[in-house]
Amino acid sequence: MKITGHGRVISVLLVLVAFAIVLGLVVAALTIWPWPGRRSSPPPPGTRVVVASIFPLASLCGEIGGDAVQVSTLLPAGASPHTYEMTPSQARTLADADLVFQVGGGLDPFVTRLAGAAAGSARRLEAMAALPAETLLAQGEQPWLAQGAVTGAAPGVADPHIWLDPVLVRDYVVPALQEELGALWPEHAEVFAANAAGLRDRLTELDGWIREQLAPVREKGLITIHPAWGYFGRRYGIDTWAVEQHAGSEPSPLWLAELVDIARFRGIQTLFSEPQLSGQIAGILERELQVQVLVLDPLGGKGRPGYGSYTEMMRSNVEIMVEGLR
């Protein structure tokens, strides 16, 4: 069919409209999509940027750094650090960092995998490295078997959930972070020191409060799905057992049967899960162990009621523990 006159004009207009739509989509994609090398809203010049792998570390950075630093958290609330993969936009955030603060010990490998994305001048701090080897628990170790003794473990095979012991945080992590921030920005060293001293006081108060809260129920012990609470249990004299003897591992029928016996002998009627774990697993274990399931959140998150700071997160978790163990 031959197009002439008015029909040709309409065809040309349709082509132009289609081209404009395609061009608009391309521009939108280039504006929104986090393609490599492009940075949206970089921090203002002179801004001191600290990037933390998980929220509890970011909270500590914010409390010590105050208004002198800008703190970003890589792991979103509800995500598991063991399996998380960073987005391209987070890689750009990492590229703007002056200090990268992570747990280490294999807990946050998503940071290690993109270590090259950090600025060449960025400093790195691992919380695990701040602790003496003799304070570390081996992965899968049941601290109650040692009856409170500290056995120690090499950092590469140690349980990385050190932030759930507020005394370890107070005595080792906070001083290491204060020193690192002071070395980076010596003009604020006095502010960092004062903020760190206040934080250590709050952690001492938190430690005393936890001991008081757990005193009536600690003889029962904690059965959790994920093996995150070993340091906490060792600190407060509360036995801990995890369904996953190693993070991500499936429990054997023999181990489940042993947990059932422990729960019956101790009068434990609550299994503690985490929001980062599959609810399906908790449901199966709820039926197998014949217990109720409550949720502890060892990672928290900014803006989440009751979990908006490190100390708030710890208090909320302890309140849930006490509720479940009564």
Image (tube, rainbow, N blue to C red):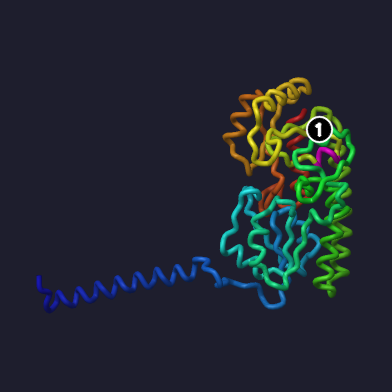
Q: Residue at x 72, y 70 (%)?
A: 122
Local secondary structure at mark 1:
loop
Nearer to us in this view, 169 or 205: 169
Instruction: Tell me the chief SS of the magenta region.
Output: helix
Q: Quadrant of residue 102?
A: bottom right
Q: Which residues make up the magenta segment?
A: 231-235
**Residue 50 painted magenta:** no
Q: Residue at x 89, y 49 (%)?
A: 204
Amino acid carrying label 1: it is Asp
Q: Residue at x 79, y 40 (%)?
A: 230
- Numbered disc total: 1
Q: Residue 209 placed where, x, y %?
A: 86, 42
Judging by the rendered image, the residue that carries numbered circle 1 is 239
Q: Residue at x 63, y 44 (%)?
A: 276
Quadrant showing the C terminus: top right
Mark 1 neighbour class, 10 Å CA radius: few under 14, some 14 to 19, many 20 or more? many
Side of 47 relative to 204 (left or right): left
Up-down: is 169 above or below 178? Answer: above
Seen as rendered, the residue at the extreme left is 1
Up-down: is 286 above or below 29? Answer: above
Q: Residue 106 placed where, x, y %?
A: 71, 51
Q: Residue 233 placed where, x, y %?
A: 81, 38
Nearer to us in this view, 25 or 145: 145
Q: Residue 65 placed where, x, y %?
A: 79, 65
Side of 49 relative to 180 (left or right): left
Quadrant showing the N terminus: bottom left
Side of 53 relative to 208 (left or right): left
